[in-house]
Image (cartoon, rainbow, N blue to C red):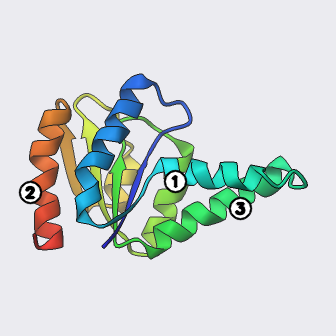
Amino acid sequence: MKIFLMGAVTSANKKQLKKYNFYKQLLHSYGELTTPDDIWAYRNKCKEDTNKTKLEIDKLMTDFDLARIKESDLLICDISSQSIGVGIELGTAYVNNNKVVFCFEKGSIISNMITGVFNSSKFIEYKNLEDLKNKLIPLLNEITNK
């Protein structure tokens, strides 16, 4: 199973980065995982070609990102923080009928567009990382037939 982990990372603070590391540890045993780290690593690889402009590098990274979404069987999306990039990724997921599990920290403001468009998706509200783990693992086991 190919899993794509998404969430706001450009403005990520230490708490968010810790959360993404937690997700990575949690998800690695369920299949081939693509994370924001993989997208940024690809971007950095593209930067090695000093003949490329920033716009060319942005385009390559975006193409890589969206191609990974299209080939993924499952998207895990933390929507605790709002992000235009996540919105674009979710538009791609919608067009491709990807299965999405949304996770969000209690008290987060969730866009009506997400709940409206993805109304048949699973939504997990969590209080802390332990609560997230306790709710996400059974759902992953059900989805992956573990």
Considering the numbered disc 1 on the image, is that residue within a helix, a strand or a loop?
Answer: helix
Mark 1, residues whose alpha carbon is within 10 Å: few (<14), some, or many (≥20)? few
| Mark 1 residue type | Asp
Which quadrant holds residue 30? bottom left
Determine if residue 120 is in view. Answer: no
Determine which residue is flagged by label 3.
60
| Mark 3 residue type | Leu
Considering the numbered disc 3 on the image, is that residue within a helix, a strand or a loop?
Answer: helix
Which is closer to the viewer, label 2 or label 1? Answer: 1
Query: How far from the left and from the top, in percent, is residue 131?
Result: 12, 36
Query: How far from the left and from the top, in percent, is residue 12?
Result: 48, 30
Q: Residue furthest right?
A: 51
Determine which residue is flagged by label 2.
138
Determine which residue is flagged by label 1.
38
Q: Are marks 2 and 1 in contact (CB under 8 Å)?
A: no
Determine if residue 126 is in view. Answer: yes
Which quadrant holds residue 121? bottom left
Which is closer to the viewer, label 3 or label 1? Answer: 1
The N terminus, quarter of image:
bottom left
Give the left or right position of residue 6, taking residue 64 as reference: left
Query: How far from the left and from the top, in percent, is residue 84?
Result: 55, 45
Q: Residue at x 59, y 50 (%)?
A: 41
The C terminus, quarter of image:
bottom left
| Mark 2 residue type | Pro
Pick the residue in front: 144 or 86: 144
Image position of 64 with respect to 40: above or below: below
- Label 3 or label 2, whichever comes before in sequence order: 3
- Label 2 or label 1, whichever comes before in sequence order: 1
Give the left or right position of residue 21, taking residue 137 as reference: right
Q: Residue at x 37, y 71 (%)?
A: 98
Mark 2, residues whose alpha carbon is within 10 Å: few (<14), some, or many (≥20)? few
Calculate the distance from the C-alpha at mark 2 to the C-alpha at mark 1: 26 Å
